[in-house]
Image (cartoon, rainbow, N blue to C red):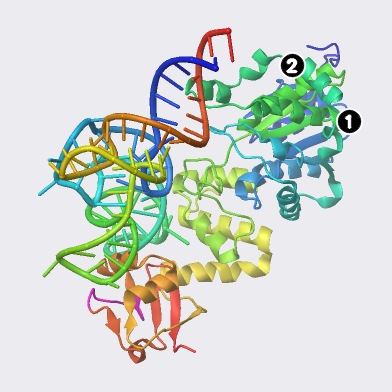
RNA sequence: GGGGGAGUGCCCGAGUGGUUAAAGGGGACUGGCUGUAAACCAGUUGGCUCUGCCUACACAGGUUCGAAUCCUGUCUCCCCCA
């Protein structure tokens, strides 16, 4: 692969110990034992994380790697955050079962903005070098060809996700095939010592080494971290599956979503999101509450915590209406209930009728009967209309 | 350029002329239960002026008493050969 290898020697005990600490929650750190040797050099290492700003929001799943970077920062290393403004246009095929559309530059810029704002709630801004990969990837085609000259198609096709897609007769675009070259070249461009990513990034991370070798650079080591399951406890957390907790979610929502994480995933959540073990002895309810408090504190500040928890207690423990709810204007005088519910809660009238039949619509806490469907406005005015357990409106007289 | 295959409800996926708004699963929603919006159980899941009516199985036509199911054209996608 390369002549650029570091002279093998025994790392000192301190290096071994801190490598052990840093890899504690990692799934793999490759090559085996390499990180300890790097740490033993006694200089700050350059820790690379590349993120493609393909989605406008980031969620807790993204923060798993950020936490790890933070750990590196705290032990004195240099974090290099690469905003993949260029690679985002290509689309990372990792773990995907289908192609993703190319994004337009304006959306990418906006996404990058919000990403960074959120990322620095975890990372220490002072100790983070931010780079955009368009800086070096926007290259002449002859330069691009030189990148493409070395890797072989067979090597690129090895990866699991492509194998599966091809076996399933699904398309794989040429652009996707080339993606690892670009990500790998990022490592060349910034002289990465260590690159971090989710387990789904393993191929790309390892490929960075190939690219570094091709350009005569020292090879990075890689660390993969577990993928955080979403609030369903099974699938990878992602916006598209709707099982995510967004870092910009309002405090009440963030706390509430944490409370619905399956008990079985609690330990994992503690380790990956707080870098701590689940406190022993605490019941799942309390452990979830504590996790929720800490996360709300991290992303919204300590002052947001009591309100968020109280909101949860009110709605889901005591089953009371929230403190403040929005007003909804009653329309014409005989109020047609399906219409009212449909307009207020954004469902179809048929759906409103069904929910009504199932006893899911309440007025001041009392379930409404399936009949009648029409009410005089004055019977409803000032009362609280509730759809299911969690949606409320105060009914007011139309303007 | 040639050959083959596929397009079904939020998603996956049955269905190949007749009680079909379309099996099953997932998701979502509602109710019960509960320490939680966990788990578990039950129900609902095209629209509407709702004991009925309307619109639906890529799109547009056609055959038929009757089509998601047959025919023609269009579009989109996949695979293979060159």
Residue at coordinates 24% horizontally, 76% vertically from top-left? A369
Q: Nearer the viewer, residue A8 or A137?
A: A137
Q: Which of marks 2 and 1 is in front?
A: 2
The picture places residue A235, in percent across and down from the top left corner, at: 49, 40
Relative horizontal placement of residue A71, taking residue A177 as reference (left or right):
right
Range shown magenta:
A362-371
Q: Main SS type for the magenta part? A: loop
Q: Which of marks 2 and 1 is nearer the N terminus?
A: 1
Question: Quick check: B73 above or below A241?
Answer: above
Residue located at (58% from left, 71% from top) = A307
Q: A106 or A254, which lies in front?
A: A106
Residue carrying label 1:
A42
Task: Check residue A363 for magenta coloring.
Answer: yes
Reply above or below: A127 against A138.
Answer: below
- Residue at left offset 64%, top offset 59%: A248
Who's the residue at 75% across and 55% down the image? A117
Name the quadrant containing residue A146. top right
| Residue of label 2 | A151
Q: Residues within 10 Å of mark 1 (few under 14, many from 20)?
A: few
Q: How far apart are marks 2 and 1 (CA)?
A: 33 Å
Residues at marks 2 and 1 touching, judged by CB atoms closer than 8 Å: no
Which of the two residues, A119 or A175, is positioned nearer the viewer here?
A: A175
């Amino acid at each position: 692969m390369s002549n650029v290898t570091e002279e093998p020697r025994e790392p000192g005990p301190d290096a071994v110990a801190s490598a052990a600490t840093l890899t504690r929650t990692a799934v793999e750190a490759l090559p085996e034992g390499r990180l300890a040797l790097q740490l033993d050099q006694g200089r700050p290492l350059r820790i690379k994380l590349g993120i493609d700003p393909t989605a406008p929001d980031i969620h807790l799943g993204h923060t798993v790697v950020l936490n790890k970077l933070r750990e590196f920062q705290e032990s004195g290393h240099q974090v290099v955050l690469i905003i993949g403004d260029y690679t985002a246009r290509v689309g990372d095929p990792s773990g995907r079962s289908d192609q993703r559309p190319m994004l337009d530059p304006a959306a990418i810029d906006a996404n990058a903005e919000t990403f960074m704002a959120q990322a620095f709630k975890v990372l220490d801004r002072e100790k983070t070098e931010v780079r955009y990969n368009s800086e070096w990837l926007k290259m002449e085609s002859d330069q691009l060809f030189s990148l493409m000259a070395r890797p072989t198609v067979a090597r690129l096709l090895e990866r699991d996700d492509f194998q599966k897609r091809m076996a399933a007769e699904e398309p794989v675009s040429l652009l996707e095939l080339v993606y690892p070259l670009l990500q790998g070249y990022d490592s060349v461009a910034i002289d990465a010592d260590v690159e971090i990513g989710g387990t789904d990034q393993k191929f790309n991370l390892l490929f960075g080494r190939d690219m570094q070798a091709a350009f005569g650079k020292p090879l990075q080591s890689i660390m993969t971290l577990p993928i955080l399951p979403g609030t369903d406890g099974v699938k990878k957390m992602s916006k598209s599956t709707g099982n995510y907790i967004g870092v910009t979610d309002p405090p009440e929502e963030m706390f509430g979503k944490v409370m619905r994480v399956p008990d079985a995933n609690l330990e994992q959540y503690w380790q990956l999101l707080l870098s701590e073990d689940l406190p022993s002895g605490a019941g799942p309810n309390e452990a979830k509450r504590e996790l929720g408090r800490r996360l709300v504190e991290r992303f919204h500040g300590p002052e947001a915590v009591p309100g968020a928890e109280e909101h949860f207690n009110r709605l889901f423990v005591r089953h009371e209406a929230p403190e403040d709810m929005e007003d909804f204007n009653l329309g014409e005088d005989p109020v047609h209930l399906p219409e009212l519910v449909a307009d207020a809660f954004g469902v179809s009238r048929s759906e409103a009728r069904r929910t009504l039949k199932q006893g899911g619509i309440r007025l001041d806490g009392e379930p409404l009967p399936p009949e009648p469907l029409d009410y005089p406005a004055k019977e409803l005015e000032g009362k609280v209309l509730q759809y299911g357990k969690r949606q409320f409106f105060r009914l007011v007289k139309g303007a």
